[in-house]
Every structure is written in C-alpha cells, then in structure tokens.
Amino acid sequence: MRLKDKVIIVTGSTMGIGKAIARRCVTEGAKVVINGLEEELGHALIKELGSDKSALHIEDLTKDGAPGRLVNLAVERFGKLHAIVNNAAAVISSNIQTTDLPLFRKVLEVNTLAPFALIREGLPHLTKTGGCVLNIGSVNAWSGEPNLLAYSVSKGALMTMTRNLGDTLHRENGIRVNQINPGWVLTEKEIERKREHGLPDDWFTKIPDEFAPAGRILHPEEIAAAAVYWLSDESGPVSGQTVELEQHPFIGRNPPKDIDTILRKK
C-alpha cells in the first residue's frame, strides 16, 4: 500500500475528482478527511469508506476559521496530518463583460485563498510529519478559455503559489508542494455545467477528435491515480512542480473552435 497509515485531507471530496482521490487514498492504506458542501453525499461516502478510515467535515472553506476546524478534525480524529489535497473549486463561467469584482473575489476566495489558508493552518502538523501538499489546478491556468476568465486567473495564481511554496516550504519545513493541472474531466459538475449551457445529456459521447483524440475525455479516477504518486513517498524530493494531465499538448497547440458551438451541431 503506497499511502499506508498516512492521514490526508481532501477538499471538495464529496463528488468528482476529490471523491475519486479520497477513494483511491483509502484503497492505498490512508485515512482521509472528507470535505465539501453536499452533506448527504458526504455521509454516503463515509459509509462506503468506513468510519474507521474516514471523517467528514461539511463547511465552506472561505468561512472564517473553517480551515483551522478542518485541520483540527484531522489531528483530533487520527492523531497527525501527512498531506493536504486542495481540490475544492468554483468553476464559474465568466468573461470580461460578465466578470464583476464581487464575482472575481468570490472565485479567488474559493480557488486560491482558501487553499492558501488551509496550507497555513496545516503547516505545523505537516512539518512534524515531513508531509506534502497537492494542489489540483487546471490546464486553464496557462491562459484559459474565453468564458472561464475568473476561474483561469484563479488557477494561474494557484500554480504560482505552488511553485513559490514548493521552494520555500521544502527548504524551510521539509514540506513538498506540487500541483496537477487536469484537462477536461467528466465529473458530475461538468455534466451539470454543460446542461446549463443547453447541451444534451449525452454531449460527452459526441466530442470531436480535435478535443479528445482518445475518443473520450478524462475520468476522475485517472486523476486520482496520478495523485497517489505525489502523495506517496515515491515522488521523493520533488517539489514546486506542476504537471498537465491532458490527452493532447496543451501549450502551443492551435486552439480549435468553441466546443459548445461544435457540440450543439452534433
């Protein structure tokens, strides 16, 4: 077991990528603290994983004191903390016309500042265990889609924070900080988001090759499989790194036409 006896906080883990990571961590021998906003889904996951291997904290991490309460639960329940997975995110469609300052601040609070606050709260405990942080970003961090302005900026800021803390915390505290930038992943939220865009429920079966050379988009379990490497001792001294998990070269690729427009014609 690659994560045997490690205690790991996974934010945004009541569904999607976070849920897949939590499941995989338990399979690999870890104990996990589940966090999210969907209480019913959270209790169902605890029942699945086992109350001896998991704990649940339902709270918005942008609330005052929430990161501290999450860390305290991990330490009180399991005695220590080895890793934090900052996965929780607000994926909100917006462009220059629709992004006002309140929306921008909200996205930054969830996607960038909450992870920072959680790392700060966990710092003493991660220092004791020589632990690590894994931030879940997005390939949009490099520039982003036209209708994901605030989201893309927030993920770019997260990536800069990963590289900054991956250097300083590794040297000063022995804590590794790395980041995965997933591409297009078939999560419950993505299905819901495309439905809101007016696409049919089976849109993911009709994605053209230019967007999905493999004939499909990524599954949450595939991101979870990669996460285990960064959370385990196998990644050794590697810190301050980001890795893109997508099925085509993202940087420098000639961008195809708007995907929503293409899918509507299918």
Image (tube, grey):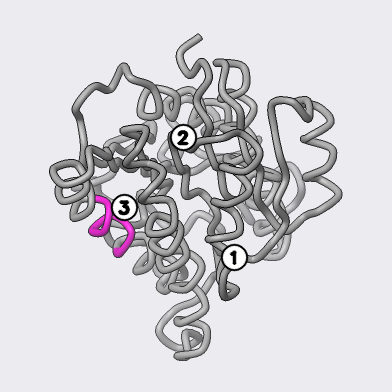
Residue 168 point in image, percent of width and height = 16, 51
Identify the main secondary structure in magenta: helix
The answer to the question of whether label 2 and label 1 lie on touching residues, with beta carbons closer than 8 A, is no
Residue 198 point in image, percent of width and height = 71, 63
Say the numbered circle drawn on residue 66.
1
Q: Nearer the viewer, mark 2 or mark 1?
A: 1
Left or right of 143? Residue 54 is right
- Residue tagged 3: 255
Write the residue at 19% across / 41% down.
170
Write the residue at 43% across / 64% down.
117
Disc 2 marks a residue whose amino acid type is Ala
Disc 3 marks a residue whose amino acid type is Pro
Q: Is 91 or 63 nearer to us in this picture?
A: 63
- 251 w.r.t. 25: above or below: below
Q: What SS does tag 3 mark?
A: loop
- 254 w.r.t. 154: above or below: above
Estimate the spatial distance between the alpha carbons at disc 3 and disc 1, rounded to whole Å. Answer: 39 Å
Estimate the spatial distance between the alpha carbons at disc 2 and disc 3, rounded to whole Å. Answer: 13 Å
Q: Which of marks 2 and 3 is nearer the N terminus?
A: 2
Q: Is 19 or 150 nearer to us in this picture?
A: 19
Left or right of 252? Residue 120 is right
Bounds of the magenta span?
Answer: 157-162
Q: Which of marks 3 and 1 is nearer the N terminus?
A: 1
Q: What SS does tag 1 mark?
A: helix
- Residue tagged 2: 212
Indicate whether residue 209 is drawn in magenta: no
Q: Which of marks 2 and 1 is nearer the N terminus?
A: 1
The answer to the question of whether label 2 and label 3 lie on touching residues, with beta carbons closer than 8 A, is no
Left or right of 52? Residue 35 is left
Q: Which of marks 3 and 1 is in front?
A: 1
